[in-house]
Amino acid sequence: MITRFDKLQTELPHPRNPSPNSAAAVQELLGGKFGEMSTFMNYTYQSFNFRGRSEMRPFYDLIANIAAEEFGHIELVSYAINLLLTGTTEQGEDPTDTPLASAADARNSYHFLASGQQALPMDSQGNFWTGVNVFSSGNLKLDLLHNFFLECGARASKIRVYETVDDPTARACVGFLLVRGGVHIVAYAKALEKLSGVDVGKLLPIPDISNKRFPEAAKHESRGLHRILYQFSPGDYPRAGEIWNGAHPEDGSELEVQVGAPEGFDPPDLDAEPQLTAPAGPDIDPDMFKEVAERLFPEVSARKRRVRAKAR
Ligand code: MN
Ligand code: MN
């Protein structure tokens, strides 16, 4: 079972230059072959499918904890895309103004034609994510090797998106994910090391550029976020620490498991877009809206009536 918190794992600033094409580039980190949908669903299925847990429990706990974190990553990237799309069309109620004109030149028109200026599980070219991206062979060494490769591929995509988009919203998101993805790279390297004795950490970093080169990532690393593996449960999955321990292969800092989810930040609550009828169009009957509100919140309505009567 999963418990859900209405929080984001990091804080996202509002964009300086909202742009449909920047949003499209960030989509690669959501629904691309190496995006968060892929990491999330790979580890989720590998954890559901894990056989022989009694002997291999620390590996099961590690994969399960990382799977839970990846759910928060699809959430974070989706919000970054939604923010980058906010302000890219003419907000208004008159369709004859061609409020969606900018969609005609957008690389990914699904953001406007198939959603209300919102993220979709697709890559930067508008190809929808599919389950073909899930690798769950049942062989632990093969799955861990795959996960290590997947995280390194994901890191390459993150770096390229960072190099494509300079908006602070995108860079805050990518910087944070570089650090957390870095934790997952080291976690799978350590897991392979425990299983085989091979010093996989010697391969790092892949690609050969340090996270410390990216100010939005370095900021989190200076606070030690690259050393922490979260146990996304108050009591379950406790044995990941039998793999996540010792020294970080890049800077030698001490690895540590933190019980429970990170505290998180409030997600942005974005305004309605009436030109996209999101969530409602300009012609909604205001009396009907009021009647629904009165039925749903009778105490609030009664209080309002009393306040209004007093004012009179
Ligand atoms: Mn991730
Ligand atoms: Mn990851």
Image (cartoon, rainbow, N blue to C red):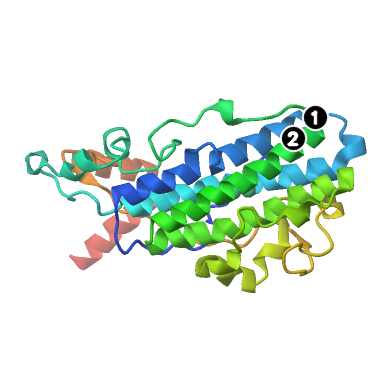
Q: Nearer the viewer, residue 223 or 126?
A: 126
The disc placed on residue 139 is 1
Q: Secondary structure at mark 1?
A: loop
- The amino acid on which the numbered mark 2 sits, given as a three-letter code, is Asp
Horizontal side, residue 175 vs residue 117: left or right = right
Q: Contact (CB < 8 A) between labels 2 and 1?
A: yes
Which amino acid type is marked by label 1?
A: Asn
Q: Position of residue 97 (x, y in %)?
A: 8, 44
The residue drawn where x is 74% and y is 35% is 143
Q: What residue sits 56% from the left and 71% below the top?
A: 219
| Point 49% across, 46% down: residue | 29
56 with respect to 187 (left or right) = right
x, y percent for residue 173: 49, 58
Callout 2: helix, strand or loop? helix
Q: Is residue 207 left or right of residue 66?
A: left
Q: Quadrant of the N terminus?
A: top right
Q: Residue furthest left?
A: 96
Would you place residue 200 above or below residue 171 in this image? above
Q: Which image quarter: residue 290?
A: top left
Quadrant holding the C terminus: bottom left
Label 2 CB sits under 8 Å from any ligand 2 atom: no
